Amino acid sequence: MKYGNFSFTPVPIFTETVETFRDAKFDLLFKRTTREFTGTILNSVNIEASGAFENLFAQKNQLKNALCSGNQEFQILFNGTPLVSGEFPRINGPVFSEGTWVDRIDYSFTSEIDEVVGSGIPVQSFNETWDFEENEDRRSVTVQHNINAVGVNTNPSGINNAFGNAKSFVLGKTGFANAQANAPFFSQVSGVSFAAYEAIRGEQHDIGQGSFSASERFTLSSGTFIHNQTAQFATDGAGVTTVSLNGNIRGLGRGDNSFNRALAAFQNDIRDKFPANASGIYSQFGGEAILFTTNASNFSTTRNPFAGTIDYTVAFTDSPSDNLPSGILDFGISVQIQAPVRQFASFLIMERALGPVVQDTATSNEGNFSVQGSAVGKPGFSFNDLLAFVEDKINDKRPSAVNYVTLRPGSESITRDEENNTVQFNFTWIFTQELSQVFGDGDAPVVIT
């Protein structure tokens, strides 16, 4: 029997034990062969001869140095033929027994060797957990996967490879594809089908213990992003209502993929729905006018490419003055109507106690319809376009002939200031109405338009 270049004489006797190691699923991980040796060092020199005692101790030190050298091949030979070879076991010992070391010294030691079983990666032990938790958005699930393993040294000689085996074993079990089939079982993800998007990774090394740990997080979602949106409906003292939308878009995945997905969602889907979403809120909470959604009264975005997020705020109002075309800085227009009055004639009769005689002439005077206002264009805005805008607004307010007996133009006043890009105007129309629609003096109700 030999260990490296050291030959055991006489050969010790030994017992052999084989253990198998399995994981929680009872799959075989590796087997360990342990041999317990007991032997005797015999003094090769007559104990009465000079140097006999020193010789025994020299043999003892040779055995100790050989077994402590490490990474040596262990062999058992019979008539020169190897029965056991190619093994580089771990040696524990030697232990020398008590006694009178004169002509002999008894000793013992053990050896261990681990062997790969099948095609698996040998580890002494491992732990693995999968955690599933629904998120506050009620549409996605966060998955936390943790796994660690302690490797087995299977290198017959040279550097211990327990850490490498642990690392290979753990990395072979990473990724959501290695989760239990059909998981999650109880937690729910919005949508009929979903995909797993990897988020964050972590790992820990213990080279001395030959252990490797990994952690990874996934988001289960039926889409490539998570979108949260809140809405605010507010009416100020002047009766102007504002609908504000505030949102956060988080793209799923690692690296640049997460932000690119958030940006694509904003550009191709979410932004186009702002008007419809705001109009729905306006109607749902009792808006009484028209919410202008062509132009936002306020819009801002904040992007974070590293977090893969986009935050936004957008607001719309029902105030016409806050929804002017992009080139108009300020605009105001008003309508004044002076209604016709039924005419009466008065005749003075001397000494008549009831006063003058009032006679209905069955006619009325003419009414007056006036449209007046002003407009200011932004610097650089075409003055001709400003005039066209004003003309359209005046035509929207001008009276229609179908509502009157007669309708004719009255006065017209236009002040153009091309240098300052401003226009002031005042147009009037004279009209008459059916006598049945005309009130008597003092009977006409007050109408403000």
Image (cartoon, rainbow, N blue to C red):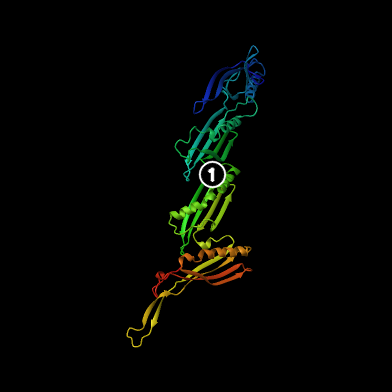
Residue 101 position within the rendered picture, expressed as x and y whole percent measured from the top left: 59, 20
Which residue in the protein does label 1 denote? 225
Residue 284 position within the rendered picture, expressed as x and y whole percent measured from the top left: 43, 54
Front one among 345 and 313: 345
Front one among 173 and 176: 176
The quadrant where residue 59 appears:
top right
Residue at horizontal 50%, vertical 35%?
129
Indicate the quadrant containing the N terminus: top left, top right, bottom left or bottom right: top right
Q: Crowding at label 1, few (<14), some or many (≥20) Cα neighbours within 10 Å?
A: many
Residue at horizontal 49%, vertical 51%?
277
Q: Amino acid at mark 1?
A: Phe
Residue 54 position within the rendered picture, expressed as x and y whole percent measured from the top left: 65, 21
Residue 152 visible? The answer is: yes
Residue reaching furthest to the top: 79
Residue 308 visible? The answer is: no
Residue reaching furthest to the bottom: 351
